[in-house]
Amino acid sequence: MANRQPGQILVVDDIPQFLDTMKQILSLAGFAVTTRLSPIKAIKELRRTNFDLLITTLVMKELGGFDVVRAVRNSGNSIPIMMITGYGSEQAAVEAVRLGATDYLNKPVVPEELVARVKRIVNPQQSSLSPIEDGRNKLITTDPAMQAVLELVHTVAATNSRVLIAGETGTGKQLIASAIHQASPRRNEPFVDLNCAAIPDTLLESELFGHEKGSFTGADQRRIGRFEEAGRGTLFLDEIGEMGYGVQSKLLKVLQDGKFSRIGGSGLLNSGARVIAATNRDLEKEAAEGRFRTDLYYRLQVVTIALPPLRKRPGDVPLLAEHFLQRFSGNGSDRHFAAETLQALQRYPWPGNVRELENLVERIAVLNPEPVIGLDALPERVMQHAVGYSAAGPKYHGKFADAKDRFERDYVTSVLAHHRGNMAAAARQAGMDRSQFFRMVQRLGISAKTFVAVES
């Protein structure tokens, strides 16, 4: 077994067709796949066979996915676990990670994303995923779903197609729009953005199309609108779901024939701008319920880019936190977060997404001048999600095997964080040879890349 190559995967679900699909996808990617219809039998299988990854679904009749994770962790087994479900929710994702799941994926399963995530878990040192910089902005991620987003950015950037960016507030929709513009042939033309939620409908039409002098009370001079300002560049309409129905009709006309008039003007102007829109609403649902024009929705969503919330890519939290800390501490700073602080940040669900994390790190950088940021720098709302946290301090509960596993994971994470992901240095501190330490890191499903410093 010492020379066995990683890639042994156990998949459990009580739907035969799903198991067949999973086996086909993963086998084609080079993994050895064992499937079990019974979660109880799968747990027994783990006791007699060494696997590199357990994949379990959340809802099964015999035993739920959460119970599977608890049983595996309580037995002292630290095998990486991926949770897959068609009944996903924010709470389910957070709970899966809290119980000890390594990753979380929603159905329907996209084969490319599944394979990328499995490769990252089973072979973290060979993963090709790394932080990416697009244009003027840092888009830092090691998450396969975000990597797929960035690949789509490069694909659509070369076209003139309209793009609809969907995602919760704070997920980086403006960054993606800017990245598309910077990677496009229009990069030397203007990038003009307009937040539709920040402007009343009575003024939004003027903001978009401009107005002539005297066209309404207060119009004491001609004003150029955003379409005219964008020229042959890119016009980014953020939070377009907040736009009123009347303005939607006039926007639709511009998208249809490329012509518009300033308010109070009689002449037609041509628009050569590419339109990228963004929303935190479900526009398809809004259109079905009559709150958004169906024809405008289909005009906008020639290509749709869906941004995952930060809570569904917890592996990016340490990278982003360290990146923001470097930015707010000044270039060349050697400040960093302690390992246990990064773990607490990963367990928080981040309802405000990357923007909330950025704001929190800025506050921490200003108020905590020490070189290593400890748990005491975190606000109560974050600490409440830390495993074992109480007002009296951190505690371990449950079985000894579970506490031992958490201690081992915390120790390895702390050593790697201290040495910024340097495996050789971490192994020396642990008093182990490099290969022995590497096997422990691999068994725990920890990626040393998480702790590599990211330049700001």
Image (cartoon, helix red, strand yellow):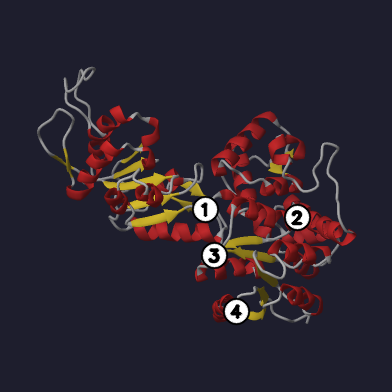
- Residue 378 appears anywhere in the view: no
Q: Residue at x 35, y 43 (%)?
A: 291
- Residue 212 placement: quadrant: top left
Q: Which residue is mark 4?
A: 16
Q: From the viewer's perspective, is the residue at label 1 or at label 3 nearer?
A: 3
Query: Do labels 3 and 2 touch, CB within 8 Å?
Result: no
Image position, residue 25 (x, y; %)? 54, 77
**How far apart are the two marked residues, 3 and 4, measured between alpha carbons?**
16 Å
Task: Determine the secondary structure under disc 2.
Answer: helix
Q: Which residue is mark 3?
A: 107
- Residue 367 appears anywhere in the view: yes
**Callout 3, which amino acid?**
Lys
Query: Do labels 3 and 4 touch, CB within 8 Å?
Result: no
Q: Tell me the crowding category of disc 3: few under 14, some 14 to 19, or many 20 or more residues within 10 angstroms, Cα based.
A: few
Q: Tell me the crowding category of disc 2: few under 14, some 14 to 19, or many 20 or more residues within 10 angstroms, Cα based.
A: many
Q: Looking at the image, tell me whether mark 2 or mark 4 is earlier in sequence order.
A: 4
Task: Determine the secondary structure under disc 4.
Answer: helix
**How far apart are the two marked residues, 3 and 2, measured between alpha carbons?**
30 Å
Q: Which residue is mark 1?
A: 308
**Callout 4, which amino acid?**
Pro
Q: Looking at the image, tell me whether mark 1 or mark 3 is earlier in sequence order.
A: 3
Image position, residue 411 (x, y; %)? 81, 55
Which label number is shown at residue 207?
none
